Image (spheres, rainbow, N blue to C red):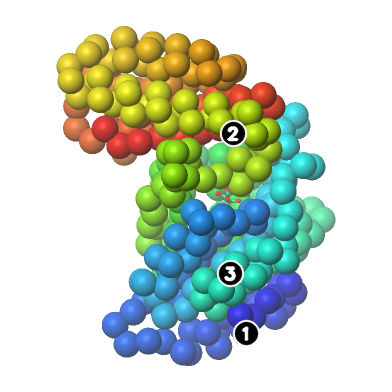
Amino acid sequence: MQIIRDLAALHPAIAALRAKGRAGHEQMALVPTMGALHAGHMALVAEGRRRASQVVATIFVNPLQFGANEDLDRYPRREAEDLAMLDEAGCDLVWLPTADQLYPPGFATNITIAGISELWDGAARPGHFDGVATVVAKLLIATLPDVALFGEKDYQQLAVIRRLVADLGLPIEVAGVAIVRDADGLALSSRNMYLSSDERGRAVALPQALNAARDAIRAGTPVEDALGAARDTLAAAGFTDIDYVALVDAASLEPLATLSGEARLAAAAKLGKTRLIDNIAV
Ligand code: PAF
């Protein structure tokens, strides 16, 4: 696996990778990450390998997508472990840009995606999706993959990135990959590392609340009652700052008062100092 830190070395390395195509496969898949990798990221790499002959990953903790009081400083950084995992998973090249390379002095561009990025996590974390859209645009343009892979755990992020790529007319397929969960159902997340063992035990209430709400809605319980019960379950497990528990349209992410078409149940709340998000199909 090649490890590239220098922006000047990236383009020749990617051109060389592109030359090694495999018949019947797209040439290159991109897996953008912020490091602190887990099995969810490895599922992205595996899907990249299934679709493309070459897989490129990026590791960059993007300061633009963290709010002033968020966890940029303590976000886990585990470069040696991450590189070993990517190598083991069969990644061909990893690019570790620095903030100076992506945002050189004078950098003044901000990408805002109206509508879809203003809902839910966008409302709870102002500016977050601007930061995501700006860095993802830069990573996509620098590497120009055929397909870029993102986890469905950040379901709204995936929708925002689909909008970004469509609006900018980038010739890149954006593919979502299903959430990977621990045995008890908790969605894997780099931020799970923040949880104490007591919090980790209680965190399972998040997928449990969503699963119970899905079952209740499918059985005909009014949506508002099912969402209220899910909020109660979260509060009883010690979650605070419940930003949302919502039934949303799977494409537009607009709230749904009744079940219709493809829908998603999504929630965000804090356990101690850790903000957790999750979502499931209904
Ligand atoms: O999902 C993430 O890890 C990040 O938001 C991303 C897409 C790599 C952009 O920094």
Above or below residue 143? Residue 265 is: above
Horizontal and vertical percent position of residue 196: 68, 33
Horizontal and vertical percent position of residue 94: 62, 71
Circle 2 is placed at which residue position?
A: 200
Circle 3 is placed at which residue position?
A: 86
Displayed quadrant of residue 34:
bottom right
Identify which amino acid the numbered label 3 is placed on. Leu
Identify which amino acid the numbered label 2 is placed on. Arg
- The number of numbered badges drawn on the structure is 3
Secondary structure beneath dot 3 equals helix
Q: Residues within 10 Å of mark 2 (few under 14, many from 20)?
A: some
- Residue located 51% across and 27% down the image: 268
In-front residue for pair 94/186: 186
Q: Earlier in the sequence, mark 2 or mark 1?
A: 1
Residue 165 left/right relative to 38: left
Circle 1 is placed at which residue position?
A: 12
